[in-house]
Image: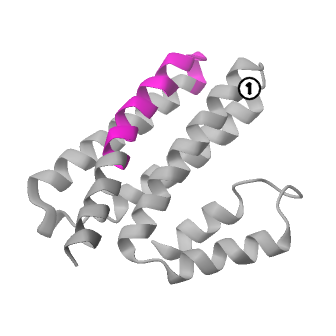
Amino acid sequence: MLGTFKAAVAAADGPGMSSMGHQAYQARAIETASPEQLTLMCYDGAIRFMRRARLAHESGDRGKVSESVGRAQAVINELNVTLNMEAGGEISQNLRDIYLFINRHLATAVMEQRVEAIDEAIGLLQPIRDAWSESMNLEQQAA
């Protein structure tokens, strides 16, 4: 998960838009993050890319829509492939189904120029992200 996520984050702002110092800071944050924190970063990144795609759609920049959706899909794919299907059982299967649905929805958003599909994808992923964050907070409080 670490390698692919590092690549996605490093490319997040595109060439020339991020300073080397900021990239080094991001890389260090990723390298020192726990698996739980990395998962939260992935959720945040996917949602951020989807929001960028929505803004690009509103401004009529189809190229940026496609690029941002592609990046969101890459992060969603990373979340999907890192699921532990053995240990996670039904929960992992349900998450896999949601991730695959979100990716299909994002593809539809690009192909049919449907911003509503992006909004729906965000609407599906945001509560999962929030629940993950809350579970991390509860775990920290219990420790």
From the top left corner, tell me how far across and down residue 45 is, in percent. Answer: 55, 52
Dot 1 surroundings within 10 Å: few (below 14), some, or many (20 or more)?
A: some
Quadrant housing the N terminus: bottom left
123 inside magenta stretch: yes
- The residue closer to the viewer here, 41 or 136, is 136
Residue plotted at (40% across, 39% down): 126
Q: Is residue 60 left or right of residue 111?
A: right
From the top left corner, tell me how far across and down residue 33 is, in percent. Answer: 48, 77
Determine whether 34 is above or below 102 in the image.
below
Could you tell me what secondary structure mostly forms the magenta stretch?
helix
24 inside magenta stretch: no
Q: Secondary structure at mark 1?
A: helix
What is the span of residues highlighted in magenta in the rendered image?
Answer: 110-129
The residue labelled by disc 1 is: 62
Determine whether 118 is above or below 98 in the image.
above
Q: To which quarter of the image does residue 61 belong?
A: top right
The residue under label 1 is which amino acid type?
Arg
